Structure formats: C-alpha cells, structure tokens
Amino acid sequence: MMKISTRVNYGLRLMVQLAVRQGHGFVFLKDIARREGISVKYLSQIMIPLRASGLVLSSRGIKGGYVLASAPSAITVRQVIEALEGAIATVRPRERPRQCETAEAVTRAIWDTLGHVIVTTLDALTLEQLVESYRAQQQREMEYQI
C-alpha cells in the first residue's frame, strides 16, 4: 500500500472544492472546511504552499476568499502534490555512485520505472477529471436516496 500524506489528501480535497466552484467567485475556507469536515486552521496551512506555487489566488475583504489561478483542466494532480510535498521521487539519489556489486542497479531500475509511471499518471489526471468524478458520485448518492 502506498501512503499518501494527510496534507496531500486534504489539499486535493480543497482543490476539488475550489474547482467545483470555479467561475462562481471567491470561496471562503470556512465553507470548504464545513463541507469537507476539515479544520479551517489546517486548510489555511495547506493553502500557503498552494498560493506560493501559483495554483490558487486569494483576495481579502467581504467578497474575498480563494479561487483557482487556472482552469481545472489546466491543473494536474502532480502539480498539487508537488506544491504540497515537493518533487515526487521514489528513491533518493545516491550522493556518490559506486560500482555496483550488489543488486542496487536492479532495484533502482524498478523504482525509476515505478516513479515514471506514477509521475505520468499524476500528470495525466486533472482537477477537471476529479470534479467529474465528484459530481458523478454526488449524482449516485442522490439517486440512492430517492
């Protein structure tokens, strides 16, 4: 099982909520916090690197809040993850290469391949696709309740 940090999980949920409301003006963190069941304080900490990376814009004042800086179709899951956690790497690069008398070269090839697949997948997945899944899930839940 691959472990995803709470920060990334909540950050993606935050970005999906912003994407769902894209085009409807600025959104307050307290509204997203209520919908997602996440503390406003934690979301505000997550918002700092998202703003710094240019994925989110903010505005102060009575009509202030947060919006995506680009269309949901232009923001990838990889961009969100890297804004929150840094570059994606499956293994740390060696400080100084040595002749390989161990199986290190073989295992490194596995991790490099896996890293490439992960990055390619995350680059191909946009917030727009996550919004489509979110809306489909909401529709299924409404149909189930009827």
Image: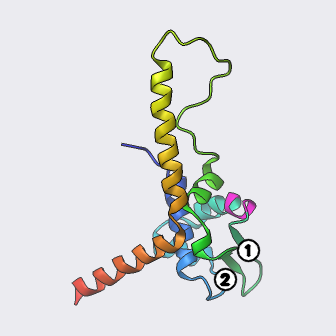
Q: Residue at x 58, y 45 (%)?
A: 88
* Residue named by callout 1: 58
Q: Residue at x 62, y 71 (%)?
A: 74
Extreme residue in the top direction: 101
Q: Quadrant of the C terminus?
A: bottom left
Kind of residue at badge 1: Ser
Q: In the drawing, what numbered circle is on residue 105?
A: none
Q: Which residues are magenta?
A: 49-53
Left or right for 73, reference 130: right
Specify the color scheme. Answer: rainbow
Left or right for 76, reference 57: left
45 lies above or below 119: below
Pointer 1 with pointer 2, Cβ within 8 A? yes
Q: Real-space Cα distance between discs 1 and 2?
A: 8 Å
37 lies above or below 90: below
Q: Main secondary structure of the magenta part?
A: helix
**Can residue 135 be found in the magenta stretch?**
no
Q: Closer to the N terminus: mark 1 or mark 2?
A: 2
Relative image position of residue 98 (x, y in whole percent): 62, 13
Q: Secondary structure at mark 1?
A: strand
Left or right for 60, reference 20: right
For label 1, the crowd category at 10 Å Cα-Cα, with few meaning under 14, some 14 to 19 and many 20 or more, is some
Relative image position of residue 90 (x, y in whole percent): 52, 37
Q: Residue at x 54, y 13 (%)?
A: 100
Relative image position of residue 70 (x, y in whole percent): 67, 74
Relative image position of residue 104 (x, y in whole percent): 49, 19
Kind of residue at badge 2: Phe
Q: In the drawing, what numbered circle is on residue 26?
A: 2
Q: Quadrant of residue 49?
A: bottom right
15 lies above or below 89: below
